[in-house]
Amino acid sequence: MTNGPSATTRAARTYLARGWAPILVEARGKRPLLSRWPESRLGEGDLENFEGRNVGLLLGSASEGLVDVDCDWPEAAELARELLPSTALVHGRPSSPHCHWWYRAPGARTAVFRVEPVFTRKTTIVELRGAGAQTVVPPSVHPSGETLRWERWGEPATVDCAELKTAVARLAIAAVLVVRGWRAEDATSIVRCPAAVVERSVERDLLPLAPIRAWLGLEQETSMQRPECSARSTGGQLVLGRASPLTEAVLLRLGGVLGAANLLGLSLHEGRQPCPFHEGQGGRSFQVTGHAWRCWAGCGQGNAIHLAATALGKTYREARDQLAGELHLLSRNHPPLARR
Ligand SMILES: [Zn+2]
């Protein structure tokens, strides 16, 4: 499928024909356009509205149990072929191939696997997206400007939701191991044996145990009813190589990217907006999502401390130390941080 004026309209028609529920999404973005999009069920008569816009798919029962495994980290996308069940429906984009794996897994709930926001990379490693969520699909245009494309356009494999969730958890852990310097073969083989991961973790302080046990279903979840996947396990946060107490204290006090922006005298808000580092009014390259930010044009990304480092032209550590001093001094009415 090529991108063109009617490409998303044609795609939406195809999705409808396959029994899936397409939804309207902002052009070159990920935000659904209808406020009640989770309940929206568009039909043939709505197709012309897709003209020039992006198209998303409602997940879960609205689309015959369709779910999407979204590999945010490139390491996860690379390992997916080894660790996720095979399926004939996969999409990606040129700079991020095969990063979305599609299945039919009735009853699957969304589960997000992430690390603490103290690294320059995205906090979300991989996400199992199910009922109540939506995913932007080809031939939509990604915020980066790239056009999404189907790399496999066949039937999504039908899988058990509990098994799929376990596979995604293993993928998340393997991706973390690869980031920590493991060979992909070693990472994929150890996560196939949860007991080995736990044993190694105890032995070598490999990864923190609590989230790993929960992710691999070694405790709590085992006592819950698995058939309908009702266990309230929605992924969780993995503390990757502990941040220093000072970093943690600074991030806690800042309470997110907007806290840092406030201190820095940057006028930012949640969502898409002009990048304060490279563009003027009307720009849309910059994105704030709670504890994380990113400039899609390449100015940078990260947590609140990375924002300060970028704004001040300092290293992460220098910015953190300056913020720490400032947060302490603020109670004595010192002026906000001066930009260099
Ligand atoms: Zn920028």
Image (cartoon, grey):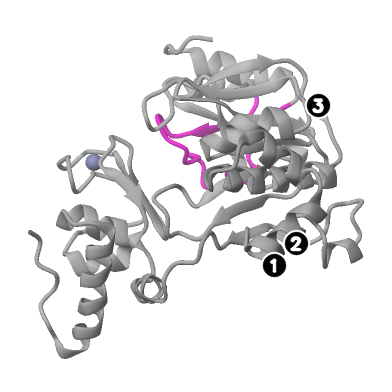
Task: Tell me: residue 18, above or below residue 291.
Answer: above
Q: Amino acid at mark 2?
A: Arg
Q: Which residue is mark 2?
A: 213
Residue 157's disc is: 3
In this picture, residue 337 sits left or right of residue 127: left
Which residue in the structure is indicated by mark 1? 210
Of labels 3 and 1, earlier in sequence is: 3
User: Looking at the image, is mark 3 or mark 1 nearer the viewer?
Assistant: 1
Q: CA distance from mark 1 to mark 2?
A: 5 Å
Q: Which mark is residue 82?
A: none
The residue drawn where x is 45% and y is 59% is: 117
Residue type pointed to by label 1: Ala
Dominant secondary structure of the magenta stretch? loop
Neighbour tally class for label 2: few under 14, some 14-19, many 20 plus, Cα within 10 Å: some
Asked whether the residues under the numbered discs 1 and 2 touch, taking CB atoms below 8 Å apart as contact, a structural biologist would say yes
Q: Which image quarter: residue 90?
A: top right
Comparing labels 3 and 2, the label whose residue is closer to the camera = 2
Q: Is residue 67 above or below residue 14?
A: below
**SS label for mark 1:** helix
**Percent from the top left, x then y, of residue 227?**
92, 51
Extent of the magenta region:
20-43
In the image shown, does 226 or 326 lie closer to the viewer? 326
Respond yes or no on whether mark 1 lies under 8 Å from ligand 1.
no
Query: Is 95 placed left or right of 137 in the picture?
Result: left
Quarter of the image holding residue 184? top right
Give amino acid for label 3.
Ala
The residue at the point 22 percent across, 64 percent down is 318
User: Looking at the picture, how far across and down is residue 319, in whole percent?
Assistant: 23, 64
